Image: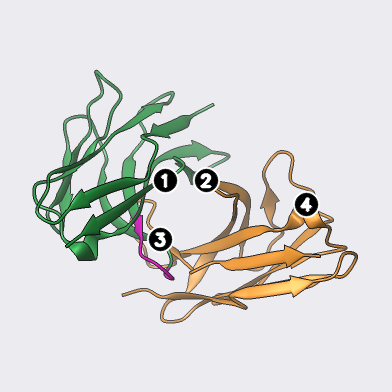
Chain colours: A green, B orange
Amino acid sequence: GNSVTQMEGPVTLSEEAFLTINCTYTATGYPSLFWYVQYPGEGLQLLLKATKADDKGSNKGFEATYRKETTSFHLEKGSVQVSDSAVYFCALSERRGGSEKLVFGKGTKLTVNP
Amino acid sequence: GAVVSQHPSRVICKSGTSVKIECRSLDFQATTMFWYRQFPKQSLMLMATSNEGSKATYEQGVEKDKFLINHASLTLSTLTVTSAHPEDSSFYICSARDRAGGPWVVQYFGPGTRLTVT
């Protein structure tokens, strides 16, 4: 079945450092790809998405490009802030039984220190 | 933005008892709600999909008689863990899909409920 693999955490960075969180996927067909973020004590929020190959999703300074040739959707940010501390989940959508469902990676915890 | 709430946020119950978890969409109508389970350091695993007014669709390996799901209105879905056992202890998360949503799968997630069965 479809699956998502993302880099193990936790990741600890200093403020203004460059962030990369790797995500690769296995899927039949052409899924849409997502990054969700979960801040402490809150539910998951959609951070960005890409729906076809070579699309770049971006939001709040974060970017990820849908790379079909490497089946990857790595999350990057040029300069992280303390407020970016959260758990980040990579996900893909798959269509089963007439409805679309999300398949998640395990999540990567990011801590940004001042 | 779209907000989904869950109640309770934490619950401790004794083995053999049942516990109900509520999931509400606060500012939108949700024809479809999803229930996930998350183990420590694991990804979210979809348990079931519920559509308003119809029976829930359970994922393979999820016991429908143990995890009862009711989606009685466009803003409320409930998950009842019946005859709970310690192995049911987990973090349960719901999400809701906006009835007015577009073609993309954008789910709005609740903050989760931590269930501990003693």
Q: Position of residue B38 (x, y in %)?
A: 58, 52
Q: Nearer the viewer, residue B107 or A43?
A: A43
Three-letter code, disc 4: Glu
Q: Residue at x 38, y 42 (%)?
A: A9
Residue positioned most to the right: B16
Looking at the image, residue B18 lies above or below residue B86: below
Asked whether disc 3 touches disc 2, contact meaning CB atoms under 8 Å apart, the reply is no
Q: Residue at x 28, y 59 (%)?
A: A85
Rounded to the nearest angstrom, the CA distance separating label 1 from label 4 is 22 Å
Q: Looking at the figure, which quarter contains the N terminus of chain A?
A: top right
Determine the secondary structure under disc 3: loop
Q: What residue span does the magenta drawing correspond to?
A: A37-42
Tell me which secondary structure the magenta stretch mostly adopts.
Answer: loop
Three-letter code, disc 3: Leu
Rounded to the nearest angstrom, the CA distance separating label 3 from label 4 is 24 Å
Circle 1 is placed at which residue position?
Answer: A107
Asked whether disc 3 touches disc 4, contact meaning CB atoms under 8 Å apart, the reply is no
Circle 4 is placed at which residue position?
Answer: B87
Three-letter code, disc 1: Gly
Mark 2 or 4, nearer chain start? 2
